Amino acid sequence: MNKKKLSLPARIFIALALGVIVGLICYFTKTQAFTEQYLKPFGDIFVNLLKFIVVPVVLLSMIDGILSMDNMAKVGSVGVKTMAYFLCTTAIACIIGLVMASIFNGAGLFPDLSEKLGSADYKPPEYQGLMATIVAIFPSNMWEAFRTANMLQVIVIALFLGGAIMAAGEKGKLCRDFAASAYSVIEKLMHFIINLAPIGVFTYMAWVVATQGAEILGSLALVLACAYISYIIHALVVYSTAVRVFGKTSPGKFFKLASPAMMFAFSSTSSAATLPVSKECANDLGANEDVASFVLPLGSTINMDGTAIYQCVATVFIASCANIQLTLGQMVLVVITATLASIGTAGVSGSGMIMLAMVLQAIGIPVAYIGLIVAVDRLFDMGRTCLNVTGDISCALCVTKWEEKKAKQKV
Ligand code: ASP
């Protein structure tokens, strides 16, 4: 009998739904420990597999993208458009987050956790300052950057190596062929690992629903709702408009074809780990291979609209708990610092919360107050990572169309 295999998005969706059902069962039968001990480890294995290919994927994908463009002017043109798209959408995300949080706060919907402030015991890492952060983007040791999966440094290495191989011309041919061949091998590996995605999605969803169910019902539900409404508004307004106007694609088609990456990001909470799936989705949407190879690794490292929204909502909420009313000047500062903080956020689980410290510091709120939301950070993280990844895919599509238009004008 010729059995038709379900498509990957369908399998991921079924895994997501089953995960929620099993999670709820474990939550109500008080068998959360089962999900923690026996299901989550399979999700961890899957995410480990993705993490281990992330450095080669980013490195080789960017080098391959640069070499395929075969012209530094084109790399520059794609780079400028990509950065402009990232910065504009992130700034809009901050404004949406701030407006929604102010509405919720103004309507008295945020819980008053001020009596808990004394027990907020989150210890933030030291923030080094802007210049030290910029210096740290440039690696002093290539292998150290790979070993610690420092993605900003890996991107810098890819840009330099790609440019140098191109500049070396005929003499660099061996390196060019090696990069192309190694990337094909990594792509095969990526396909294999992505096929295991439903297992990762199912086990993580079951674990999250079983262990965090009580927290959702707890006092932070409205803050969470505020963040999710902002995520949804951003996706429906900003990305829908961008893909329709610039990407010449209907929003319905866009969200349908981007959904495997969105669901995967939702359950894995890592943009970097979702990169292989995002690449497939961008491909299906008709984004140019070279452009996507350049935009997506960069986006998974520096383009975080969901994180920016979360940082704004969390800042307003924490400020209100500390009885601080933000002035307009402070709000502008929040937009600027949240945009920068989201750029500095690594595409891994939970890092947006660490960078929230920078925003709070900028407006003079004690950073230890992050302790108020630590417990439910994963729930915020699921939505923000989903939005982060959607933003990257929409950018790949829009930049593709802009480049096509430019090429046609030249003819
Ligand atoms: N988990 C997010 C991501 O990978 C980053 C964050 O924590 O905000 O995109």
Image: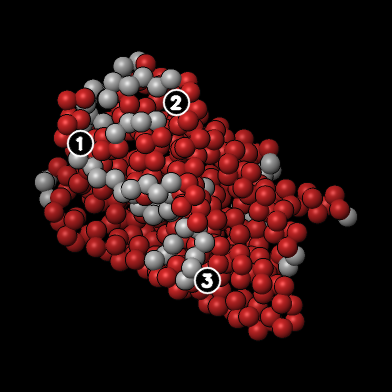
Q: Secondary structure at mark 1?
A: loop
Q: Position of residue 131 (x, y in %)?
A: 49, 49
Q: Residues within 10 Å of mark 3 (few under 14, many from 20)?
A: some
Q: Residue at x 52, y 71 (%)?
A: 187
- Residue toward you, 344 or 56: 344
- Name the mark on residue 120: 1
Image position of 217 with respect to 350: above or below: above
Q: Residue at x 47, y 37 (%)?
A: 337
Q: Position of residue 365 (x, y in %)?
A: 32, 31
Marks 3 and 2 in Cβ contact (< 8 Å): no
Q: Which residue is mark 2?
A: 330
Q: Residue at x 36, y 31 (%)?
A: 364
Q: Amino acid at mark 1?
A: Ala
Q: Amino acid at mark 3?
A: Glu
Q: Position of residue 97 (x, y in %)?
A: 45, 30
Q: Secondary structure at mark 2?
A: helix
Judge whether residue 334 can be spotted in this image.
yes
